[in-house]
Structures are given as C-alpha cells and as structure tokens.
Image (spheres, grey):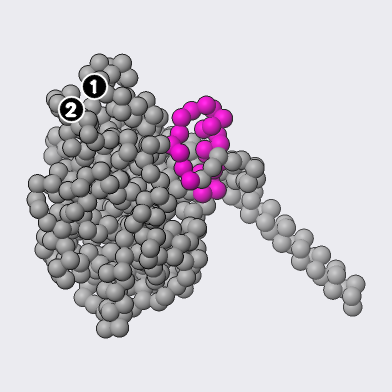
C-alpha cells in the first residue's frame, strides 16, 4: 500500500502520515488532513465502516505552504492539548490536571422551552449554540444532522451549517456515529460569516490546529463547543442496535441513540430505530440495557485511535458539555449536564440566564466534573499509560501523548482488563463482518461472548478481593476495640 501511494504522491508529509497514523490504525477519520487547502487526501469508509483518510487520485496537490502533519490530532508533529489550550486560554482561566483550563464549572439543565426534552441530557449544548446564533454572535452553527442515505453514501449523519434557530434545534442529541469535517470546512471558506462548531475532543483539537495555519478559518470560526466523549463508534454500532430490533444491516434509515425513557435513571435511556422490516417502514424503541453490546466499557466498534487519546473533556473547546454522571443527578430521567466554561462570553451568557431562571444550574468544583467522568479518565490516563507501554514493548510507532508509558502503576488484574478491552474492540469489527456475511446476528454474539465473559470475570475477581480486604480491616478494627476494652 505504501509503495502504491508513494508512486502517486511524491510528498514526504503524506508518506509519513501514511506510514505512522494511517497504517498504524490511529486515524480517527476527522477529516482535518483532507481539509487542508489543496490536500490530496479524502475521507472514505473502510471495510469496518470507519471513516479513514485515503489518497484522492484525481486531486492535483498544491499545498506546499501548508502542513498535513501539523493538523492531524494523532500526529506526533502536532501540538498537544496543553500547548493549544495555553495559547487560547491561559490568561483568563484556572488549570485542573484532568479537565484542563476553566473559568467556571456547572451542573444543571435548561428550564425554558423544550431544550431538555429534545436533548440527550440537560439540553445545554443546543441552548448554548442557539443563544450564540440568536444573540448575533455567530451567523451559523456547524454541527451534526441526520441525512438520508443513498446507494453511493450510506451514512446517516454528517456535518451541516445551521443558520436558523429551528435548524439548530433539529440538530440536537448525541450521535455515536462516524462523521468528518472536510466538506464543511470548505463551505466555511466559500461562505463568509462567523461560525460556532460542535465536536468531540479530537475533532475540536483538529479544528484548533487547522485554525493555527489557515487564517481564513481562524477569522470565521469564533466558538468551539466540545462534547465529552467516551470513544467514537463505527457505523456498525448503529447497525448492531437496529439489527437486534429487527432491522437488518442496510435497511436502517434513522436512529436516535439517546431516547429518554420516563421513570428511568438518566443512564437508562433507550434507542429508537427506523427502517425497513419485511419491506415495511417501522420504528422500534428499546431500553439500551436490553441490547447486547451497549456496555460502553466493552468498547464494541471503537476506533483504535480512541485508545490513544488522553482528552476526555474537549480541553481545547471554549465550552464543554457532557452528562452529569454524579449520584445527585443521575436519577433524574430528564438528564443533567456538566458544563466547563473557558470563554468569558459564554460564561456571561450562562450567568445571566441563571439569574433570569432560564437555566437551573449548580456551581460544582472541577474535581466534581472530573468525578462525573471517572471511568473515562481512568481509561485515558492510567489505562493509556499501560497501553502505551505495551505498544512501546512491541517496538511499534504510537502518537506522542501527555501520558507517559508505564506498567508499574497498575496491578495484574487492571493490566489484564486493558488487554481485554483492546481485544474486545478489535474482535467486534471482525465478529460483525462474519455475522453480516452469515446473515445472522447470533454469530456476532457467539464470537464475542467468550471474551466478554473473561472480561467480566476480571471484575468479579477484583470485587471479591476488595470485599476480602474490607472484611479483614473490619476484623482488625474489631479486634483492636476488643483488646482496648
């Protein structure tokens, strides 16, 4: 593959990107490299239905004044999140070792209109970009909308520019689905205006990197709105959910990944799928925990790149929105957001709305925000250090991260869990392909169940060890009390 592309594109940066990020499996499909003016790269779906960078053989590369490697979020030649954030936020913000720079941190929800009903959680993400538009601070919002699949492009979602309040609000909710930004970046160049863009951490990082070398994008993109991210999924994740509801792969036409269910905890949401079943249009809703493979910790259909990311909360965004997975909020079925504010304009907007009563927000600490994403930070900090160590031991290339390779900080059980998570993610792609080829979802489950059971056993062993330690401490304390008495 390298020789073929080298013959067509005689450019050292393209070859280096190919030999490290792309061939190493670290491409997250964001489209930043294809967004560089004159880039010979394009984004297309691979066999696992992940978006990946590839060579556009019809292009005429003319980008000598621009860098491809410096805009890729997983290139070792691009700035890391701390370096980017220091440039943008350091004068105004405090710093926290997990959530990065921040002006203020909140938890709450939108109390006006139906923002909360239409959103995945508390409605804050849509409320923020809607107010940026309605207050004349931007002319358009760049975010993800549903689209109609076609024979040449089966994707259900893509980036789109919304210029009206209704368009913005129609783009609410989380999308666990691959998208890319190169087409919309070209639209920004062609359509003068001020824009806000919404994205997951690696995408917002890529936008910041593009803005550093493209003055036109830097002038037109005024706000970056980040979404807290567990990991990115391939298209197969949506197909797997729909298949279990009776809609076979290729027949899914629409999906709501975060259907709120009444009288259920916020993390017990549903999935709504619409598509063709026996030639008829149908819609099904199922609680997410009734469907196989929806445990986020299993990492089914995860991009490999996501296991080499150390940014949980979009540290380079002007404001970050996510789920408030905290005990005092999780029982509310309507959902509650955590919000990390880094831009004074957005901070003022939120404060004024709190005073007016249109937002119901609590001030929480940076530590509480980090606690709300505890599992994510454990996986992308302690877990990442061990995965980097394993990659280094194999002698393979990996993107330089703020976390350093290490094995000594994790016990054997935690190390085994990391190995199993990598295996589960990789095998899910293979198992789904086999199931689709066989035309039976049961093949997918049969091939993954042995790994899933081994993974769960690691948790059970760890749990019993913790219980045994607690019992031991209790007996020691009781014995000490008895002796003193």
Residue matched to label 2? 61
Q: Could you say whether the residue bearing mark 2 is in a helix, strand or loop?
A: loop
C-beta proximity under 8 Å, tags 1 and 2: yes
The residue lying at 59 percent from left, 49 percent from top is 459
Seen in the picture, residue 237 relative to 479 is either above or below; the reply is: above
- Checking the image for residue 9, the label placed there is 1
Q: Which residue is rendered at x = 31% and y = 28% of the image?
A: 13
Where's residue 444, x and y in %? 39, 37
Quadrant where the C terminus is found in the figure: bottom right
Q: Main secondary structure of the magenta part?
A: helix
Q: Label 1 to label 2, Cα distance in Å?
A: 8 Å
- Can the viewer see residue 278? no
Region of the chain picked out in magenta, as a range: 381-402
Tell me: residue 432, above or below residue 107. Answer: above
* Extreme residue in the left direction: 191
- Which picture quadrant has residue 247? top left
Q: Is residue 456 magenta?
A: no
Q: Residue at x 80, y 65 (%)?
A: 475
**Relative horizontal placement of residue 190, taking residue 288 as reference (left or right):** left
The residue under the point 47% across, 66% down is 366
Count of marks placed on residues: 2
Q: Position of residue 407 (x, y in %)?
A: 61, 40
Side of 244 relative to 61 (left or right): right
Q: Earlier in the sequence, mark 1 or mark 2?
A: 1
Q: Position of residue 62 (x, y in %)?
A: 17, 29
Could you classify mark 2 by the number of other residues whose Cα lies within 10 Å: few (under 14), some (14-19), or many (20 or more)? some
**Residue sitting nearer the eye, 154 or 92:** 92
């Amino acid at each position: 593959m390298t020789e073929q592309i080298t013959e067509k594109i005689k450019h050292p940066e393209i070859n280096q990107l190919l030999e490290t990020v792309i061939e190493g499996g670290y491409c997250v499909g964001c489209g930043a490299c294809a967004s560089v003016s004159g880039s010979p790269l394009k984004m297309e779906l691979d066999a696992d239905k992940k978006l990946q960078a590839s060579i556009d053989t019809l292009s005429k590369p003319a980008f000598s004044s621009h860098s491809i490697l410096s805009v890729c979020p997983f290139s070792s030649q691009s700035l890391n999140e701390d370096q980017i954030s220091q440039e943008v936020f350091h004068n105004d913000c405090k710093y926290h070792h997990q959530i990065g720079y921040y002006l203020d941190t909140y938890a709450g929800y939108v109390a006006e209109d139906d923002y909360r009903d239409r959103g995945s959680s508390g409605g804050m993400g849509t409320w923020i970009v809607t107010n940026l538009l309605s207050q004349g601070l931007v002319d358009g919002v760049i975010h993800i909308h549903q689209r109609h699949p076609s024979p040449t492009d089966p994707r259900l979602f893509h980036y789109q520019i919304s210029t009206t309040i209704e368009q913005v609000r129609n783009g609410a909710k989380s999308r666990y689905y691959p998208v890319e930004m190169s087409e919309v970046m070209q639209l920004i160049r062609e359509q003068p205006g001020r824009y806000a863009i919404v994205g997951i951490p690696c995408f917002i990082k890529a936008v910041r990197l593009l803005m550093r070398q493209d003055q036109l994008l830097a002038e037109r993109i005024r706000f970056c709105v980040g979404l807290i991210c567990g990991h990115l999924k391939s298209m197969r994740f949506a197909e797997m959910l729909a298949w279990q509801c009776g809609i076979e792969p290729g027949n899914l036409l629409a999906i709501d990944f975060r259907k709120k269910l009444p009288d259920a905890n916020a993390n017990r949401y549903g999935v709504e799928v619409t598509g063709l079943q026996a030639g008829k249009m149908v819609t099904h809703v199922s609680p997410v925990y009734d469907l196989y493979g929806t445990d986020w910790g299993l990492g089914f259909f995860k991009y490999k790149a996501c296991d080499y990311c150390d940014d949980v909360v979009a540290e380079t965004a002007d404001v970050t929105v996510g789920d408030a997975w905290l005990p005092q909020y999780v029982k509310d079925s309507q959902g509650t957001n955590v919000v990390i504010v880094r831009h004074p304009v957005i901070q003022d907007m939120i404060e004024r709305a709190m005073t007016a009563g249109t937002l119901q927000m609590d001030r929480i600490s940076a530590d509480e925000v980090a606690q709300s994403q505890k599992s994510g930070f454990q996986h992308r900090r302690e877990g990442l250090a061990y995965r980097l160590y394993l990659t280094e031991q194999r002698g393979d290339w990996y993107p330089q991260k703020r976390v350093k390779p290490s094995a000594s900080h994790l016990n054997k059980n935690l190390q085994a869990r990391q190995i199993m998570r990598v295996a589960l993610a990789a095998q899910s792609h293979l198992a789904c392909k086999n199931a689709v080829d066989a035309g039976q979802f049961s093949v997918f489950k049969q091939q993954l169940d042995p790994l899933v059971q081994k993974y769960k056993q690691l948790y059970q062993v760890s749990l019993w060890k913790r219980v045994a330690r607690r019992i031991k401490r209790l007996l020691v304390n009781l014995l000490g009390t008895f002796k003193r008495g």
